[in-house]
Each structure stands twice: as structure tokens, then as C-alpha cells.
Image (cartoon, helix red, strand yellow):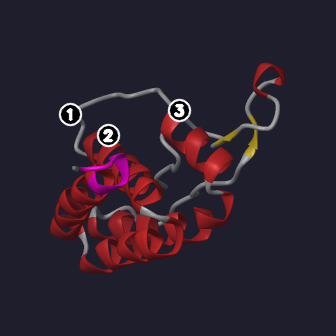
Amino acid sequence: MNTLQDEYEDVAATYIKLVRKTSLEASLTVSQIQITFGAHAAVLAALIITVLKMQTEGNECIQDDHLLALVVKEYPTALPLLNHAITYCCQTWGIAETTLIHPRPHSSLNAGVHSAPESSGFSAA
């Protein structure tokens, strides 16, 4: 019988393969997130990267920081690795200078939950 954790492992493996299409280094970093923090954290990281890729390609304009807020809340020590993976992807996407994830309080309604200063998690120079 499959457990929820098993399903996260399968989803994480799929998304890591998708990230690998953008950057081998980024996929290795997301794999490190999976090893260190678990499959759920890896899925969140890979989804954040996927959303950022869609934004850079101009396919979607997603103004939702809930994935990032969830990582900040549940896996705050994973942020340096997530930043590292995003940096590799941004280099691949041709974004020379990035302002990555710098957690700060999002609102007084979400005490203890932080978000990125910008909706996408980064800005291109």
C-alpha cells in the first residue's frame, strides 16, 4: 500500500527530472533538498522553480507566493539550497543578476509566515 510519503517521492522524482531539463546543478540541489528535508520539501522547491520558469518564459503571470511562504514556514533552513537552485536556473534563463528569496513578514494576518519581497521570488536586472 502506497503512503503519502511514497507519493511525494514519486512526484519529487518527476519534478527533479523537469528541473534537470533547465539545469543539472539545480536538479542536484533539489535532490539535496530531498535528501536533507524530505520529498515534500523537494516538491515545493521544484514547483517554485517551475513557476519561475513559466514566468520567465512569459507563459504565466502567477502572483501567488503561497508556495514560497510554505517553504519559509515549514523548511526555513532549506532556503539557502532553494536560492542556490534558483540561481543556477536564472543563469540558464539568461538572468544575470538576481535578487532571490529574502524572507520577511508578509502581513500581520500571517504571523510567523514569511514571503518574498517580490511576487516572483526574484527580479531581473
Residue 94, compared with residue 116, is above or below; it is: below
Q: Does residue 84 appear left or right of residue 14 in this picture?
A: right
For disc 2, the neighbor class at 10 Å (few under 14, some 14 to 19, many from 20) is some
Q: Tell me whether the residue at label 1 lies in contact with that at label 2, contact meaning CB atoms closer than 8 angstroms.
A: yes
Q: Is residue 55 left or right of residue 64?
A: left
Tell me which amino acid carries mark 2.
Gln
Q: Is residue 125 magenta?
A: no
Give the extent of the magenta segment. Answer: 2-6
Q: Position of residue 125 (x, y in %)?
A: 49, 55
Disc 1 to disc 2, C-alpha distance? 6 Å
Which residue is under mark 2?
A: 55
Q: At x 26% / y 42%, what residue is drawn?
A: 54
Vertical position of residue 8 compared to residue 19: above or below = above
**Disc 1 on helix, strand or loop?**
loop
**Residue farthest to the top?**
109
Amino acid identity at mark 1: Asn
- At label 3, counting other C-alpha atoms closer than 10 Å, the crowd grade (few under 14, some 14-19, many 20 or more) is some
Q: Which of disc 3 and disc 2 is earlier in sequence? A: 2
> Mark 3 = which residue?
66
109 relative to 77 in the view: left or right: right
Q: CA distance from mark 1 to mark 3?
A: 19 Å
The picture quadrant where one finds residue 14 is bottom left
